[in-house]
Amino acid sequence: MLQLSNAFADKNVMSLRTGAAVAAITRPILNPNNLKIEGFFCQDLYDRKELVMLYQDIRELLPQGFVVDDHDVLVEPSELVRLQDIIQLNFQLINMPVVTSNKEKIGKVNDFATEIESMFVQKLYVTRSMFKSFSNGQLSVDRNQIIEINDNRILIQDPLQGKPSGANATALA
């Protein structure tokens, strides 16, 4: 099931053991290499410290928030040795410019949809410039259209290009 990014914003982290909220989600930790949400930064409701909840510690997603076993699954960012490079990148998809392979500026990412089971970002929703939005509106980009992601932009296949003609020729044969 796909969830938009705002479905994660301001959600509570609920302890299964106590049945109460133990933290509040502040932002996702995105891996730009594979567009996977590795975890979430949370604000601890007890100590007001910034902690991390890894995606594999999530038991369930409810309308009230994320359910985890206990407060103990939340860890300090410095303890996550394997994720240090990704945490230090502080990669954010929202407001990232989107450009086609033909160097045409499409717009900026204003939202994304994540598949809940795997936590991979599946779709990007791009807001076009004011002039282009009158004629075309918002653009949806599937993850298989992405060619490259770097610090400055997201490079995608040109959405107006059709499939290669070789695909139709083999279907007819």
Image (tube, rainbow, N blue to C red):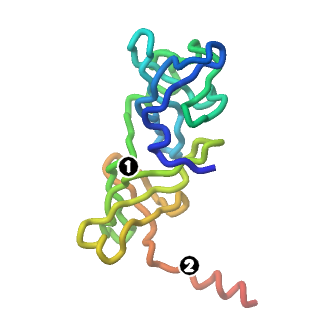
Query: Residue 54's x, y, as percent?
Result: 56, 27
Residue 109 position (above or below residue 165) = above
Q: Nearer the viewer, residue 10 or 108?
A: 10
Q: Residues within 10 Å of mark 1 (few under 14, many from 20)?
A: few
The quadrant in which residue 155 appears is: bottom left
Q: Quadrant of the C terminus?
A: bottom right
Considering every residue shown, the one lying at the far top of the view is 47
Left or right position of 166 against 126: right
Earlier residue among tags 2 and 1:
1
Residue at figure coordinates x 65%, y 19% from the top left: 16
Which residue is under mark 2?
A: 163
Examine the image and state in which quarter residue 63 appears. Answer: top right
Q: Amino acid at mark 2?
A: Lys
- Residue 120 in the figure: left or right of residue 171: left
Q: Position of residue 50 (x, y in %)?
A: 40, 19
Residue in the foreground of this view, choosing between 42 and 34 = 42
Q: Which amino acid lies under the numbered mark 1 shown in the image of this protein?
A: Asn
Which label was assigned to residue 150? 1
Left or right of residue 116, residue 33 in this image: left
Horizontal and vertical percent position of residue 148: 44, 55
Q: Quadrant location of residue 51?
A: top left
